[in-house]
Image (cartoon, helix red, strand yellow):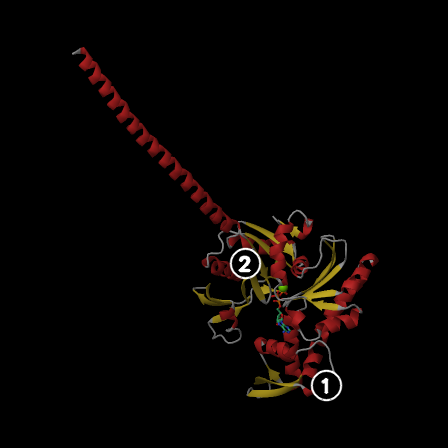
Amino acid sequence: MEVWVSYLADVCMFLAVLFGGLCISHILQKIVKTFYTLVISIAFLAIMFKRIFNTFTRDMAIDLGTANTLLYVKGKGIVLNEPSVVAVTSVDGKYKVLAVGNEAKLMLGRTPGHIKAIRPMKDGVIADFDIAEAMIKHFIGKVHNRGILIHPRIAICVPYGATHVERRAIQESAESAGAREAYLVEEPMAAAIGANLPITEPVGSVIVDIGGGTTEVAVISLGGIVYAKSIRVGGDIMDSEIISYMKSKFNLLIGETTAEDVKKTIGTAIYDESYEKETMIIKGRSTIDGHPKNVKVTKGQIAKALAPCVNTIAYSVKEALESTPPELISDIIDRGITITGGGALLNCIGDAITNTTNVKTNIAENPLQCVAIGTGQSLSYIGKLGYAVLKAY
Ligand SMILES: Nc1ncnc2c1ncn2[C@@H]1O[C@H](COP(=O)(O)OP(=O)(O)OP(=O)(O)O)[C@@H](O)[C@H]1O
Ligand SMILES: [Mg+2]
């Protein structure tokens, strides 16, 4: 009997151990499974978080130009390029934005009384803070909607001669438009970086950025600006000169958009007698009887109208060379002067500068985009370029 009881106890013991083992292995299996699930989830979350964080920290640059605003995103290039124009209407004494950029530019000079098409930038700086801020917010929002960035680190360029107050206004507008950090970059430095000039090397490079509102001339060497000057002469004044010329010579009233079109179509920086044979029909309104009127102008006549602006630009480059240390001049003679900005596209502008300075010129690749690209790339120079890339306030 005792033997049986002992056997039974052994069997029970065996079953208990077997069952216990099975339970333990089941529990262990569960633990291991949970552990693996946890590790995989953490890894997945880390990857997701890294991706989100990368989006979150993606650098962005704004070229807030008098004529055009460009947005550049690191790794994506230029993501927006639109005219710096905002169309507004007044509701209860407050402005309501109707259109921004391309859409608003179409309205320039064509708006009914209650709508105004405003250019918030003048001479490269903010002339109307509220409108500029609305414009920047709209453009950043447009890019943001495409899922490209959230609270980016923004670099924004300022003309070389911008005052403390003007710089502050530009930085504040970027910050209130959603920038996590806003850096200001000197425009000639940005243009030089965008034009791939060897700015950090001990050689002299000359950059001439002819924009809508300003022309910036700078001599750069070893990551610093050796000489720079910003003159408030650019594409806008060229357009005004064409408007004045048409008025005084032909009693014809034309708008800014028509004048710009004439400049882009037959404008040239150098006069040549053969240009008297090339003509363009310009439509406007007679200043005498108010009737619509067509006038035939020659390329030579437009060259004469543009001559004062072109000379001012060319002489400011000459002045820069005269103020440059002689050691750098030899580099400049070898390497030439690089021209960027929309004005670089004016027919023969390089030749006009060469005629005045006796130094060869090169038009940068993508002259309209150099400043935006260079502003974006300048973020990677923080700490290396000293005062050229600034965290202003
Ligand atoms: N083909 C062309 N010929 C002459 N001028 C041109 C041509 N294309 C564009 N432009 C002019 O270039 C100017 C715009 O250049 P850009 O975009 O570099 O100026 P911006 O950066 O807006 O101005 P800024 O730098 O002064 O603030 C306009 O005045 C435009 O009329
Ligand atoms: Mg510009």
The number of discs equals 2
Mark 1, residue position: 274
Q: First in sequence: mark 2 or mark 1?
A: 2
Residue 285 pos. (x, y %): 57, 84
CA distance separating discs 2 and 1: 45 Å
Residue 296 pos. (x, y %): 63, 87
Up the image or down, 46 lies above or below 245; here it is: above
Residue drawn at x 68%, y 48% as measured from the top left: 384
Residue, far right: 326
Residue 98 pos. (x, y %): 45, 67
Quarter the N terminus occupies: top left
- The quadrant in which residue 342 appears is bottom right
Residue 287 pos. (x, y %): 59, 85
Q: Which residue is at the front of the view, 11 or 185? A: 11
Q: Is mark 1 within 8 Å of ligand 1?
A: no
Left or right: 209 with respect to 11? right
Left or right: 329 with respect to 78? right
Please state which amino acid type lies under the numbered disc 2: Lys
Up the image or down, 101 lies above or below 255; here it is: above
| Helix, strand or loop under label 1 | helix
Left or right: 128 with respect to 52? right
| Ligand 1: image quarter | bottom right
Q: Residues within 10 Å of mark 1 (few under 14, many from 20)?
A: few
Residue, far top: 2
Please state which amino acid type lies under the numbered disc 1: Ser
| Helix, strand or loop under label 2 | loop
Mark 2, residue position: 76
Query: Tag on residue 19?
Result: none
Viewer-nearest of discs 2 and 1: 2
